[in-house]
Image (tube, rainbow, N blue to C red):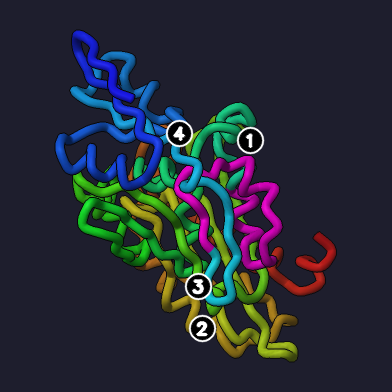
Amino acid sequence: MKIEAARSMYLRPNTLKEACDLLAERPAQILSGGTDIYPALVDRPSPEAVLDISGIDGLRGVEQGGREIRIGARTTWSELARADLPPAFDALRAAAREVGSVQIQNVATIAGNLCHASPAADGVPPLLILDAQIELASRTGLRRLPLSDFVLGNRRTARRPDEILSAVIVPRASAGGCSAFVKLGSRRYLVISIAMVAVRLAADGGSRIREAAVAVGSCSAAAQRLGALERDLVGRSWHEDLASLVTGRHLAPLSPIDDVRGSAAYRLEAARELIGRALDLCRPERAHAA
């Protein structure tokens, strides 16, 4: 479908191939849930062209294969919150229930959250701890890149103008263990976070940590994995006070700012506290109880 108005062109393809062909011919603002694009148009001119991908059914849903788990770009946060996924995805499901309000969760998509690339995007830390990959489609084919290479900074991504984010892919090898997501804001819903943390821990079959992944959002231009802390957690016993292991050295990759929601120093302290809480939530006895 193509509608030409006085100020903009509205395009609504039925297939991914059609969408990629249209995008190759002209730059366009991609629209799906619309929870980001419409608020941004309040005091700005409409884009010259809008490419509405909400009619492409093949971009929606969760597929669990033997080697990877594929989340379609148009999958909503409500769908993710209800999805039957391994415990390693608990952080992502928890984040899904924190995105805006229930009304927003029902229409906002995982791809929109990632492409908007806000430093406070709730979906980024839980996907970072899963080593998520981004699939980008264009007329020339598909390409994949790690999420850490896709989100480049505040409102900046590696998506080319002729590309559409078609799926988020998690390798099965990164879907082990349990995970937790903890967010700090001035209230529970409809709030931009001051700091947020996602943690995934996997056991070695006994009482020690075999694998650790820790990511922090809202404390730098893009959410960051804390590699030094992850290395220091591996080999530790579940019975230790894991929160006490977190030091300023571990938080060095972060670069928080001062703004109306909190100072940089406050954000760092909040991140340290949230990491401790998330580590505690990942303990086997807590995870099984949940």
Point out which mark residue 188 bears. 1
Q: Position of residue 114 (x, y in %)?
A: 40, 48
Is 73 covered by the magenta stretch?
Answer: yes
Q: Position of residue 168 (x, y in %)?
A: 45, 57
The residue that label 3 is drawn on is 171
Residue occupying the point 76% across, 66% down? 287
Q: What amino acid is labelled 1 in the image?
A: Arg
For label 4, the crowd category at 10 Å Cα-Cα, with few meaning under 14, some 14 to 19 and many 20 or more, is: some
User: SS of the residue at dot 1?
Assistant: loop
Circle on res. 55: 4
User: Residue 146, position in %: x, y?
Assistant: 35, 66
Secondary structure of residue under mark 4: loop
Write down the region rendered in magenta: 70-95
Quadrant location of the C terminus? bottom right
Which quadrant of the structure image shows residue 7? Answer: top left
15 relative to 83 in the view: left or right: left
Report which quarter residue 148 is drawn in: bottom left
Tell me what residue is drawn at x 63 percent, y 35 percent: 188
Q: CA distance from mark 4 to mark 3?
A: 28 Å
Amino acid type at mark 3: Pro
Classify 221 as above or below 224. above
Q: Is residue 64 above or below residue 218?
A: below
Which label's residue is closer to the chain start, 2 or 1? 1
**Residue kind at label 2, given as amino acid type:** Asp
* Residue pointed to by mark 2: 232
Tell me, yes or no, whether the highlighted magenta stretch contains residue 207. Answer: no
Q: Is residue 170 visible?
A: yes
Q: CA distance from mark 4 to mark 1?
A: 32 Å
> Looking at numbered disc 4 in the image, what kind of residue is underneath it?
Gly
Question: Whole-Å distance between the Cαs marked 2 and 1?
Answer: 32 Å
- Secondary element at tag 3: strand
Along the polypeptide, which appears first: circle 4 or circle 1? 4
